[in-house]
Amino acid sequence: MDSPILELEGTAEEIQLRIADFAGQRLHVSVRQLDESNGASAKANKATMSIEEKIRARFDLVPPGERIRVPADLTSQLDH
């Protein structure tokens, strides 16, 4: 079963304080540097994003090797 995606945002020091919460767990970590002026506006933009934009933003977080496993029309298992 896949684990839910948890996003942490903050300074390296703020995130480091949370590392102990994941002791003994295997993690996949991606780091994206945010522009200081972009951090607050990114949160504001999430509230105004359409559902399509939110889905696309999440999809962009999927590693390229895993993206090829997603059906092109996203409906191969729609009825299951």
Image: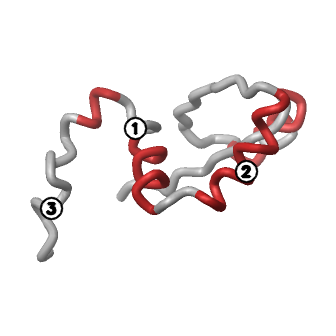
Q: Is residue 74 above or below residue 10?
A: below
Q: Which residue is mark 3?
A: 75
In the rendered image, residue 4, in percent from the top left (x then y), is placed at 50, 57
Q: Nearer the viewer, residue 56 or 2?
A: 56
> Whole-percent x and y of residue 16?
83, 33
Marks 2/3: CA–CA distance: 30 Å
Residue corresponding to mark 2? 43
Q: Which residue does the numbered mark 1 point to in the structure image?
A: 62
Q: What's the amino acid at mark 1?
A: Val
Dot 2 or dot 3, earlier in sequence:
2
Assign a secondary structure to mark 3. Answer: loop
Quadrant the C terminus occupies: bottom left
Amino acid type, callout 2: Lys
In the picture shown, does residue 62 fall above or below 54?
above
Q: CA distance from mark 3 to mark 1?
A: 18 Å
Q: CA distance from mark 2 to mark 1?
A: 20 Å
Residue 31 location, quadrant: top right
